[in-house]
């Protein structure tokens, strides 16, 4: 699989198909969450898409169209506004610009030894 990361931080993992000119079959989810979103919020969709690709590879199944697993960034808007920023920039709904301190809603860090 080839992996690309766009300018906003969305991750695209591509498994080629027999006909790379076909539009890809896309599956995935966001990788951010909310405090009450639950431990599988967002990431479960990414893992499910990866499992599909792994199963196709294990069974040596070729597809006509390429398959792409997508990790959308900042969909919940828990760190930066607006919500659905990653997919919005990808779709051309939002114009990308580098986030500055005034756009950060909450910042924290912790270090464990």
Image (tube, grey):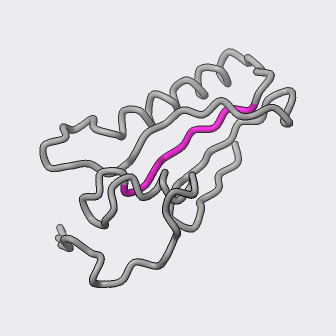
Quadrant (top left, top right, bottom left, bottom right) of the N terminus = top right
Residue lying farthest to the left in this orientation: 36
Q: Residue at x 31, y 67 (%)?
A: 80
Q: Where in the figure is residue 84, as x and y percent of width and height?
A: 39, 52
Q: Where in the figure is residue 43, as x and y percent of width and height?
A: 36, 40
Residue lying farthest to the front in this orientation: 93
Residue lying farthest to the bottom in this orientation: 101
Q: Residue at x 60, y 48 (%)?
A: 12
Q: Where in the figure is residue 68, as x and y percent of width and height?
A: 63, 37
- Where, by quadrant of the figure, is residue 14 drawn? top right
User: How many marks on residues?
Assistant: 0
Q: Residue at x 29, y 58 (%)?
A: 77
Quadrant (top left, top right, bottom left, bottom right) of the C terminus = bottom left
Q: Residue at x 18, y 72 (%)?
A: 108
Pick the front one: 96 or 56: 96
Q: Is residue 103 left or right of residue 45?
A: left
- Span shown in magenta: 66-74
Pick the front one: 81 or 19: 81
Q: Is residue 104 left or right of residue 38?
A: right
Q: Where in the figure is residue 46, as x and y percent of width and height?
A: 45, 37
Magenta stretch containing residue 80, yes or no? Answer: no
Is 74 rendered above or below residue 96?
Answer: above
- From the image, give the main secondary structure of the stretch colored magenta: strand
Is 24 rendered above or below residue 102?
Answer: above
Q: Is residue 99 left or right of residue 18?
A: left
Pick the front one: 5 or 110: 5
Q: Is residue 21 left or right of residue 105?
A: right
């Amino acid at each position: 699989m080839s992996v690309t990361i766009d300018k906003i931080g969305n991750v695209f993992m591509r498994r080629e198909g027999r006909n790379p000119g076909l539009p890809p079959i896309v599956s995935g989810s966001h990788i951010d969450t909310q405090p009450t979103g639950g431990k599988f919020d967002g990431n479960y969709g990414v893992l499910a898409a990866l499992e599909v690709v792994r199963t196709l590879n294990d069974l040596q199944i070729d597809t006509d169209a390429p398959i792409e697993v997508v990790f959308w960034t900042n969909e919940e808007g828990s760190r930066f506004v607006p919500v659905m920023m990653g997919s919005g920039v990808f779709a051309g709904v939002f114009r990308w610009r580098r986030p500055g301190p005034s756009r950060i809603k909450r910042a924290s860090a912790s270090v464990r030894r």
